[in-house]
Image: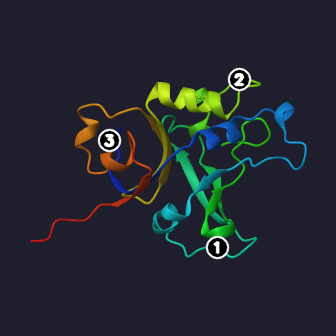
Amino acid sequence: MNGDLKIDELWSLKLKPSDLYNIERWPSDKPATGGGHTYIQVPKRLVADVLAFLREAYPDKGVPVILEVNNRARPDLEAERLEFWEKSSGRMRIARQNRHGQARLRAWSPEMGFPSLEQYQDTGDAATLLDSIGGLHIYLARAADGTVWAGYTVGNPSEADSQLPFADILWGDSPGGYWRYEAPTK
């Protein structure tokens, strides 16, 4: 996972079946009232972690925190804009992530191997899929040069990846979290 990228900070989030369903939902499956959410929800317990990574305070209503993000799987692609917005009850959302109605971050797209649902599949199907792959975490990693990279992991780490200092928040049952490199003190 780490490769030749020196990671200084990392934030991750384990996707729930409802998140996967909502970012995969087809236009024909739109709720009768409203459009249904098309974002990835950051639960309240992980908001402090994402804000630490973003190096921002909780955003005011109607004012997004914007991040330029590169694709870890395809570093040759141009950086993309990723928006974080406030949400009720102290939660946050990663906006515009439904692949059928918006331009989802390419690093989290089926073209990069990201798990997907077919038309007419629902939250139950999303749960079955996530169980079959051992879970799905999205992540943002800040490199030593300040660039931000997006990617995802599934299942459990390889033997080598399990030795990474942030492995505990990036695979398996972890809900996600924040990790920052701390230089050893003398």
Q: Give the residue displayed 49% in from the left and 70% down from the top.
A: 55
Would you name the residue on which mark 3 appears? 4
* Relative depth, front residue between 5 and 76: 5
Q: Name the residue at the front extreme.
A: 124
Of the residues tagged 3 and 1, which is closer to the observer? Answer: 1
Q: Which labelled disc corresponds to residue 168? A: none
Q: Is residue 82 left or right of residue 181?
A: right
User: Tag 1: residue type?
Assistant: Pro
Contact? badges 2 and 3 (CB < 8 Å)? no
User: Tag 2: residue type?
Assistant: Glu
Q: Is residue 141 left or right of residue 109?
A: left
Image location of residue 125, percent across then percent down: 63, 27
Contact? badges 2 and 1 (CB < 8 Å)? no
Q: Is residue 128 above or below residue 14?
A: above
Image location of residue 107, percent across then percent down: 56, 39
Dot 3: element: loop
Q: Earlier in the sequence, mark 3 or mark 1?
A: 3
Q: Is residue 30 left or right of residue 95?
A: right
Q: Give the residue displayed 79% in from the left and 32% down from the top.
A: 26
Image quadrant assignment for residue 64: bottom right
Q: Is residue 118 left or right of residue 53?
A: right
Image quadrant assignment for residue 105: top right
Would you name the residue on which mark 2 appears? 118
Would you name the residue on which mark 1 appears? 59
User: Tag 3: residue type?
Assistant: Asp
Of the residues tagged 2 and 1, which is closer to the observer? Answer: 2
